[in-house]
């Protein structure tokens, strides 16, 4: 039986095994998908051990997305642009790296949430692997402006420079700023939290002035981890959304890479939403 996994640290909370098992059921594929906790200083060794044990591929979550890109022997154009990968495919001697986070986020925002990005003002919070993976596809939706806010301004600047040519080509204004910059205000149409602040219960990293009535405020985390951000967004008139839809959509893209079959992501998201909501009530 073909073996896949999600690898990260932490990883015990991941719903990916359930998602891929359901994808396999609905598409008639035979596979096993599990969680793999990688040591913070041992990602490469963990990947190679999983591959040696018969693994066919893995999803990569925090904090290893940059390391996953560097480990690969082949990188998709999206990985080359982002410098980060969330999907590895073991193909003979090759380790092929893809990034399905961006397509997954865009599919959730524009499809599941029904919010157009074209001509809008977007705030992307964070400049790590998660933010890097979604920036290119966000630019590809032709928003009017994307601002990247990060605690370390230099990292946000680096991400802007990496994507500057694409932004110019798509006529999108791309800017970087520090999270504590007093100029970070004005009310964005879409706010995406790509930091791990929710996992650590560190609170919302930006002021409420970034929101306006009707702003779509999406945290890439889901379940209890995203609740604080969603409560904050709702209290300030925004439309809160967690990352469950993005999780399912990026998983569908990974499944397509591995199996050559696109699973019914909308149906699986609806099922998973019921499971997650029921768990939150107990």
Image (cartoon, rainbow, N blue to C red):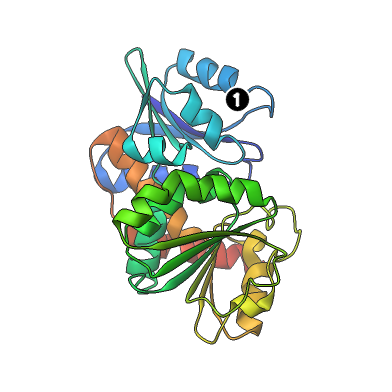
Residue drawn at (47%, 13%) of the image: 52
x%, y% of residue 127?
A: 58, 50
Q: Quadrant of the C terminus?
A: bottom right
Q: In the figure, is residue 54 to the left or right of 226? A: left
Question: Is 152 drawn above or below residue 182 in the view shown?
Answer: above
Secondary structure found at label 1: helix
The total number of labels drawn is 1
Residue drawn at (40%, 43%) of the image: 20
Q: In the figure, is residue 196 to the left or right of 270? A: right
* Residue 118 appearing in the image: yes
Q: In the figure, is residue 245 to the left or right of 168? A: right
x%, y% of residue 15?
A: 52, 49
x%, y% of residue 92?
A: 32, 14
* Residue 268 appearing in the image: no
Front one among 101 and 155: 155
Q: In the figure, is residue 206 to the left or right of 45? A: right
Label 1 CA crowd tier, 10 Å (few <14, some 14–19, many 20+):
many
Q: Which residue is mark 1?
A: 43
Question: Is 66 drawn above or below residue 2 in the view shown?
Answer: below
Question: Is 176 drawn above or below residue 109 in the view shown?
Answer: above
Front one among 216 and 163: 163
Quadrant of the image occupied by residue 149: bottom right
Front one among 69 and 15: 69
Quadrant of the image occupied by residue 100: top left
Residue drawn at (70%, 54%) of the image: 151
Front one among 197 and 244: 197
């Amino acid at each position: 039986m073909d073996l896949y996994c999600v690898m990260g640290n932490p990883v015990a909370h991941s719903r990916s095994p359930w998602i891929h098992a359901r994808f396999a059921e609905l598409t008639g594929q035979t596979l096993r998908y599990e969680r793999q906790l990688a040591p913070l200083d041992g990602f490469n060794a963990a990947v190679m051990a999983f591959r040696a044990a018969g693994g066919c591929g893995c999803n990569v979550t925090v904090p290893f997305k940059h390391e996953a890109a560097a480990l690969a022997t082949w990188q998709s154009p999206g990985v080359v642009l982002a410098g980060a990968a969330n999907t590895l495919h073991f193909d003979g001697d090759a380790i092929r790296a893809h990034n399905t986070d961006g397509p997954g986020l865009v599919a959730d925002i524009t499809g599941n949430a029904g919010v157009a990005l074209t001509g809008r003002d977007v705030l992307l919070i964070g400049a790590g692997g998660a933010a890097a993976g979604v920036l290119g596809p966000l630019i590809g939706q032709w928003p009017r402006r994307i601002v990247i806010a990060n605690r370390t301004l230099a990292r946000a600047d680096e991400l802007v420079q990496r994507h500057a040519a694409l932004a110019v080509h798509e006529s999108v204004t791309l800017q970087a700023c520090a999270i504590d910059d007093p100029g970070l205000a004005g009310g964005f149409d879409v706010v995406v939290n790509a930091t791990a602040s929710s996992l650590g219960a560190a609170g919302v990293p930006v002021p409420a002035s970034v929101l306006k009535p009707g702003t779509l405020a999406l945290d890439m985390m889901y379940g209890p981890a995203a609740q604080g951000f969603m409560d904050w967004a709702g209290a300030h008139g925004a439309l809160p959304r967690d990352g469950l839809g993005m999780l399912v959509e990026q998983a569908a893209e990974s499944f397509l890479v591995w199996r050559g079959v696109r699973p019914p992501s909308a149906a699986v998201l609806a099922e998973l939403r019921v499971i997650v909501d029921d768990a939150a009530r107990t």
